[in-house]
Amino acid sequence: MKLWQRWRTPLLIFTFVNVLFVSSRVLLDSNIGKRKVTPFTFPATVPLPQWQQVASQPLPDRIVEQEPYGKVAFPGRRYQYKQNSLLLNIDLRYELNTVGDGQQAIADNLNLSFPTNRSPLQIRRNPQLGDYAVFVHQQKAYLNACINSRGGSTVTPSQFDANRLRYDFQFQRIAFWLLGRQELRDNRCIWTHLSLPLNQPVPEAYSTLEQAWFSWYKWWSSRFPPI
């Protein structure tokens, strides 16, 4: 007897039992399919090595209609740090269902927009941490990235999708998705925008931002909000 014939009946029984279980849960549990947003508030202080925090204030919530949650508020916060004569701003925005488009996030969160065919964003990669973008605009140097729930940082939709395909399609998440407890893809993101006045040559400004970003990412990657 071929191997597949030997296992065909147990597999059919397993599939039937699972379908029966999921169907009964859907019929008996009125909460199946409902999505709840876990409230999240950014902390007032975040340590950043070699920098002194001098200010922190919440940003106005972005209120949007977003399936399958309905009307939701995206919280944000601005942190300010000082190192000698340098003043570093870090703006954060927590988003539930992003597509991972860094240029759109810059437009939404910083109110900066650029023609698609003349984008100033330079995408860089750190092998241990992931991808990010740097650019200069109006005498300021910027670094921008999306901190993912799983996987390295990203700045483009294709990078974000690659993380979702690699980390989200796992047995436990599929089981919770079948039960209606969570989305199959975890499209959450902490959009991070670092900036400082351009009081030094551009390469040095980028290096300063990168060193701050590497420490910032390591702190947040282990403290990503629970789903």
Image (spheres, helix red, strand yellow):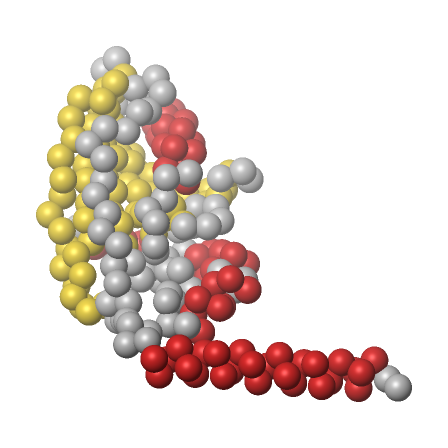
Q: Residue, x 41% and y 50% (percent of image)?
A: 149
**Nearest the eye: 39 or 192:** 39
Q: Position of residue 27 (x, y in %)?
A: 35, 83
Q: Residue, x 43% and y 46% (percent of image)?
A: 153
Q: Quadrant of residue 48?
A: top left
Residue 216 in sight from this viewpoint = yes
Q: Quadrant of residue 113?
A: bottom left
Q: Position of residue 170 (x, y in %)?
A: 54, 62
Q: Is residue 72 left or right of residue 206?
A: left
Q: Is residue 195 left or right of residue 122?
A: left
**Nearest the eye: 161 or 182:** 182
Q: Position of residue 9 (x, y in %)?
A: 71, 86
Q: Tally the marks.
A: 0
| Looking at the image, residue 180 lies above or below residue 215 | below
Q: Is residue 108 left or right of residue 124?
A: left
Please, which residue is most extreme toward the right here? 1
Please, which residue is most extreme toward the top here? 84
Q: Position of residue 152 (x, y in %)?
A: 48, 46
Q: Residue, x 37% and y 67% (percent of image)?
A: 181
Q: Quadrant of the N terminus?
A: bottom right
| Looking at the image, residue 81 lies above or below residue 114 | above
Q: Residue, x 36% and y 44% (percent of image)?
A: 224
| Looking at the image, residue 183 lies above or below residue 130 | below
**Nearest the eye: 33 or 166:** 33
| Looking at the image, residue 133 lies above or below residue 4 | above
Q: Quadrant of residue 184?
A: bottom left
Residue 110 in sight from this viewpoint = no
**Nearest the eye: 12 or 168:** 12
Q: Quadrant of the C terminus?
A: bottom left
